[in-house]
Amino acid sequence: MKNKPDLSFWKLWNLSFGFFGVQIAYALQSSQVSRIFSTIGADPHDLSYFWILPPLMGLIVQPIVGAASDKTWNRFGRRLPYLLIGALVAIIVMCFLPNAGSLGLGVSSAIIFGLVMLMFLDTSINMAMQPFKMLVGDFVNEKQKGLAYSIQSFLCNAGSVVGYIAPIVLALFLSNTAPSGEVPPTVTWAFYIGAAVLLLCVVYTFIKVKEMPPHEYAEYHGIKTESSEKKEKTNIAELLVNAPKVFWTVGLVQFFCWAAFLYMWSYSTDAIAGHSFGAGSTQMAQGVTINGQQYNDKYVFNGERPVVLDGHLAIAGIEVDGEFYEPQTVTVNGDTVIVDHQVAYSLGVAKAEIKGTDDGRGLLANVGDTIAINDGEAFQVLTSAVTISEWSTITPGTTLTLAHIAKQNAETGVYFLDQTETLPAVQSCKDVTFNYSTVLNAASQEYQDAGDWNGVLLAIQAIAAVIWAIVLATFRRRKLAYSLSLLIGAIGFISVLFITDKYMLGVSYALMGCAWAAMLAMPFTILTNALSGGHIGTYLGLFNCTICIPQIVAALCGGAILHCFPIAENGAPMTVYMLVVSGILLLLGALAVWIIKETFGGAENPTDAAQAKTE
């Protein structure tokens, strides 16, 4: 087997430069997706569940990409075709995801659309990210791998900084608020700009990186002939059985680390919004209770009329001078509009406010206003007795329908209901109550400011990771550096519970950055040092499962864990405790580091292996 030559700094740089653009996309995903879903109207107890699909897809796709790239040889290269496909899909999805709340969909439909986009975004980002890790394994010798992964870590964190601070920088030029249910322009344009940078980085990588032809790759990686490799079948189960022990021990550390950071991505915006920014709460209707039996779902209908719609009680009707109407459309002086039992936008600019009264109704119009009902009969308001009412009570004998999906026909206004359940007939109006969950008001200025500040904090984390990566290179004992980094990160997570000042939170997130730096560099350095031969890509694809599986497990458990903690004074969940959980997980990861026993199967000779062990 030929020895791989030393590469110049700029060749090492070019191998990983595209990581800069990929990481901008990843940073926007990790910092803004929970904010997007909360803005659309998602319950915070459901936030972690939204992160199940992305790692689940990664669990399936990454081993396939790794194994396929080991066998791919064409005019574009071996790993680069997968970078191209992943990046192009990510660019397209980044243009759609932040608009999930602006497409005229209901809350449920918008969340479903966002989930599909998130699934494709995370899958494509990981597909684009994987080739860079493989390229280092393909081109770089053991002596330079530490430097190569340090450069990759630097570019990764530099891209993270850009992605994290983009929304707050854009707030200098664009609005940071939007109508209820819509994502602010600062977030939307951050995704657009991130997509453009990703495209430029991919083009640069294709121009600067030329992969080895098959025969040259075989010489450097101990593969006897090209033909023998083609005859060799990749049996993933067999490879797992024969995987070096370090594959599993590092994977255990990965489990604790990635579960910890998934909770940070899922809950950090809500945590600092409630804990440091004082964001208010709001109630979301989520079903009814009839005769003591609770029924929760996205929609409740009374015949064809909505009762619970998009997290709010629908408007039952309007009363004008003592006369009650059940209109489809109401217009007040041409601008405040009720459409299909919901207050619509006032000339598409701002949502009309309904001022509450003591009897639970809301004042809609003032004396002198003109009201048109169903674009037909008009009333000149002579008194202030013009009110609207929500479904505060249900009359006896009413049979309600529970639905998980409700799609409205744009032409007829009729709803199509799916996944329905007919509820028991109401015997008495006293037997019916509506179920609410209290959440932070994602439409408030405080919440959106917290969303921007979360990006700043994550940027501080990324900058700290860059600095700490330099410090890590000075450690002679790799496991000590790894464990210490995770311990420092754990302190950072737990300290958030005791800090309310938004500037002091920067210290906490800087400590988290130490753990992030180690997570990016240490596992792959340790693993690739233990690998040799023609299955590096397959093993790296399989190793990505140690990133996906902990995220899936953490996402499944997140809602249940959050329910175990007390609620805040405003009634909203105290999501800051989920960051404490992250800290505990990192403590476990720091302990697990010490069961790793490094091997050096890829060392060029026994002397190199002995030297590597001393480091």
Image (cartoon, rainbow, N blue to C red):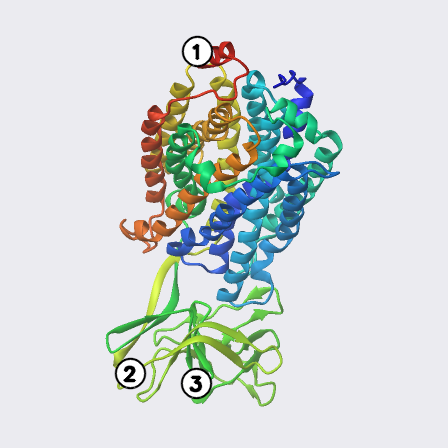
Residue that label 3 marks? 303
Identify the mark at residue 88; answer none if there is no mark: none
Element under label 2? helix
Q: CA distance from mark 2 to mark 3?
A: 17 Å
Q: Choose mark 2 or mark 3, whichever is in front.
A: 3
Q: Quadrant of residue 335?
A: bottom right
Which residue type carries mark 1?
Answer: Thr
N-terminal of the pair, mark 2 or mark 1, is: 2
Residue found at x 56% / y 67%: 105
N-terminal of the pair, mark 2 or mark 3, is: 3
N-terminal of the pair, mark 1 or mark 3, is: 3
Residue found at x 45% / y 13%: 615
Discs 2, 1 touching: Cβ within 8 Å: no
Q: Nearer the viewer, residue 32 or 91?
A: 91
Q: Nearer the viewer, residue 356 or 248?
A: 248
Q: Is residue 425 above or below residue 357?
A: below
Residue that label 2 marks? 429
Discs 1, 3 touching: Cβ within 8 Å: no
Q: Callout 3: 10 Å neighbours few (<14), some, many (20+)? A: few
| Location of residue 91 in the rendering, given as x and y in whole percent from the top left corner | 65, 48
Element under label 1? helix
Q: Nearer the viewer, residue 449 or 91?
A: 91
Element under label 3? loop
Q: Is residue 336 visible?
A: yes
Discs 2, 3 touching: Cβ within 8 Å: no
| Location of residue 500 in the rendering, given as x and y in whole percent from the top left corner | 37, 38
Residue that label 1 marks? 614
Which residue type carries mark 2?
Answer: Cys
Q: Nearer the viewer, residue 83 or 375?
A: 83
Which residue type carries mark 3?
Answer: Gly
> Which image quadrant: the N terminus?
top right
